Image (cartoon, grey):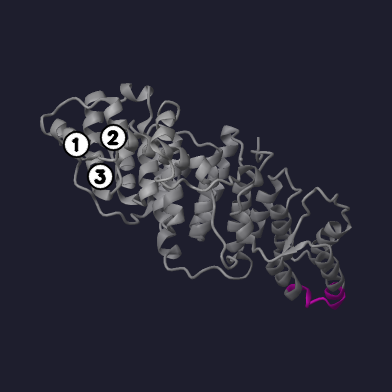
Amino acid sequence: MAPREEASGGAGQAASAPPRSRLRPSGPGRKMAAVLAGGSQRVLREAVRRSAGRPPASGCWGCAPGGKRYLLTEDDIKLQEFQQMKVAIRNEIHGNKDPYFKSIKEKLKKNGMILKNELKKLLHLCQTSSDVELARKVIYRYHEQNGITALHNFKFGPLFMRLCYELNLERPAVELIKDQNLRGFFSESTSFHILMTMLFKKGCFESALEVLVEMKKQGIPFNKETYLLAFAICYKLDSLESCKISAKLLEEAQLKGDTLPLRALCFAVATALKQNDVAQAKFYCSQIMKTENKLYSNLQVLVQLRSGSLEEVIKILEAAVEVDTPPFVKKIEFSEQVLATVREKMEENPDLSVKLGDIYTKLQTSGRITVCTLEDMLFQIPSSKKMPAKLLHQKQLGYQAARSLRSNLLLE
């Protein structure tokens, strides 16, 4: 049964950490076929090499000036709640973390037992990379002493990942999540999602792919957010091999009966189009059930255009013009760059070119043309996900407010 998109289109001595390896692409393509596809390791051998150094996409795929790239929102990552808790705990110790850090270091030295609340407090007090290095050692000691059984009551993985996300430290995050000595510490998808989001935002798409592979190897089930991140990573890698990864991911989702987000399927369509695989792009389009939206409409125009079905392109645009949209319903808009691509192709047919000119005028008059590129649309936060509140600045909360937060902001 083919997956359908969601209707809303919404992981030596352990006391001392092992030597840290240099964070760099390590050929995720060599593992992906075996891990995700179960086939030949040759399939993705060149994924990183071919995507490295690729110039910014042009045409329909470029980013409008000032455009931002979103996958999971700050609300999904729960960064604001984490920052609020940090302020609350910091105010409890009157802003002086040194005595607490000293006591933790003494425990490490004496091989003392690390308690759950001690590690939790430590992670909320970290402010620098050197603080995170101490937390890293404590995590190894805690996991050595308690193993997986203690993790059922509190999930430390997402907490550590939020800390790394806030401090912009991807290296320790990647090292710990891939370390076999910590197997079970990152036992849920949230940790992997936060890390992949951080790597994606930094443009480290190969490393993000490695984390996806690691998630699969550790047996963490994929969900809608995983698929969204995975297809977006493949889109950004922009290679024949990443296109094959998309196909394998969809095949696996079909076998499991998983529900795919609308944007995940749209990323798959876009990836196929960028690789000139029109047949695959058509297939992905056929999996999309919620078609009354601008992202699908723009992609469908390009799919038909690449197929040489110029008449179909005209029909799609004409249908949009003829729709009588109520004032309170958002109109389907077409990207100016998509229409420019259509106009260039239509020059081969003078009659259709004239027809397109008339349709363009009507689209413009009715406010259905946008400067957003197709890539802007792909990375746009769905309206249901937008959050007006800004991220909390740590000095915004006073001592009294922080005390009340302490009791009810326990994160997973």
Point out the tag, 1 or 2, that comes first from the N-terminus: 2
Amino acid carrying label 3: it is Asp
The secondary structure type at the circle numbered 2 is: loop
- Name the front one of labels 1 and 3: 1
Callout in the foreground (3, 2): 2
Is 256 on the left-hand or right-hand side of 368? left
- Percent position (x, y) of residue 114? 22, 27
Residue 79, percent from left and from top: 45, 42
Query: Which sits earlier in the primary sequence, circle 3 or circle 2?
Result: 2
Amino acid type, mark 1: Pro
> Residues at badges 1 and 2 in contact (C-beta under 8 Å)?
yes
Query: Would you name the residue on which mark 1 appears?
Result: 99
Q: Earlier in the sequence, mark 1 or mark 3?
A: 1
In the rendered structure, find residue 320 and report the number of the disc placed on it. Answer: none
Mark 3 vs mark 2, CA separation in Å: 16 Å
Residue at left 22%, top 28%?
Answer: 144
SS assignment at label 3 = helix
Crowd band around label 2 with a 10 angstrom C-alpha radius: few (<14), some (14–19), many (20+): few
Q: Verify whether residue 353 appears in magenta.
A: yes
**Foreground pick, 379 / 339:** 379
Q: Which mark is residue 131?
A: 3
- Looking at the picture, how far across and down is residue 369, in whole percent? 75, 64
Q: Is residue 40 visible?
A: no
Stretch of the chain drawn in magenta: 345-354
Q: Are marks 3 and 2 in contact (CB under 8 Å)?
A: no
Does 316 sit left or right of 294 as displayed? Answer: right
Residue that numbered label 2 is attached to = 93
Residue 53 shows in the view: yes
